[in-house]
Image (cartoon, rainbow, N blue to C red):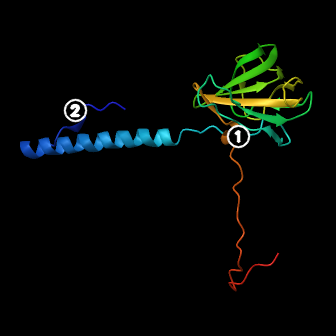
Amino acid sequence: MTLLRSDFRPHRALSPALGRSSARCGVTVAFGLALAGQATSAASAPTAEFGWPLSPRPAVVRAFDKPEHDWLPGHRGVDLAGSEGQSVLAAGDGIVVFAGAVAGKPVVSIDHPGGIRTTYEPVTATVPVGRRLTRGTPIGVLDTGHAPCSPCLHWGARRDREYLDPLGLIHRTPIRLKSLTDPSTGSPAGP
């Protein structure tokens, strides 16, 4: 939205001093409304939704272990139990940016909104580079060869150069704790 000073001319019937004050007030209000409109559109921008890359929901065999520095040992993803030939799914909407081999292992990488990239290995791709995907779209099949569990899926995530725990991308069902007392009587709740 472009605002011009000429858009806020005071009414001719007003005194010059009042006109300048009204014009300044109008510019301030219009500028504030323009900023509020930008904030609203930024806040309402869609957020990425992620799900599990294997179905049914897999067991986590090895958890994320972020190294203190990029060059130190750690586990830059999670290992999920699977079966050879199982379909691997895009965890979120995005674009395939890599489908090929890295150090002899088949890998698929997807760029998602918000600067997040997810990687899946060992996965033989069934989608080409450049393909736009939605969450849950099959991207390939799980191969064997990933230690310590084979077959299992190594699922990684990062934002720019920072490694993320991919499980943090999934909106899990919140845990609801049950009251230890009966609200109507105040006595301990039964089994």
- Is residue 178 found left or right of 124 in the rendered image? left
**Residue 97, percent across and down?**
68, 18
**Residue 28, percent across and down?**
25, 42
Q: Residue at the spot x=76%, y=21% of the render? A: 108
- Is residue 186 found left or right of 148 in the rendered image? left
For badge 2, the amino acid type reads Arg
| Quadrant placement of the N terminus | top left
Q: Residue at the spot x=29%, y=32% of the render? A: 3
Q: Nearer the viewer, residue 85 or 64?
A: 64
| Vertical relation: 177 (above or below) 65 | below
- Answer with the quarter of the image where residue 77 lies: top right
| Secondary structure at numbered mark 2 | helix
- Answer with the quarter of the image where residue 159 lies: top right
Q: Residue at the spot x=91%, y=32% of the render? A: 83
Q: Please give the label number shown on residue 2.
A: none
| Quadrant placement of the C terminus | bottom right
Dot placed on the residue nearer the N-terminal end, 1 or 2: 2
| Callout in the foreground (1, 2) | 1
Query: Is residue 101 in sight in this rendering?
Result: yes
| Secondary structure at numbered mark 1 | helix
**Residue on which disc 2 sits:** 5
Q: How many labels does the image show?
A: 2
For badge 1, the amino acid type reads Leu
Distance between the alpha carbons at the discs numbered 1 and 2? 51 Å
| Residue at the farthest front position | 72
Q: Which of 6 and 110 is in front in this view?
A: 110
Query: Is residue 14 in sight in this rendering?
Result: no
- Is residue 116 found left or right of 143 in the rendered image? left
**Residue 140, percent across and down?**
83, 24
| Vertical relation: 185 (above or below) 161 | below
Q: Are marks 1 and 2 in contact (CB under 8 Å)?
A: no
**Residue on which disc 1 sits:** 167
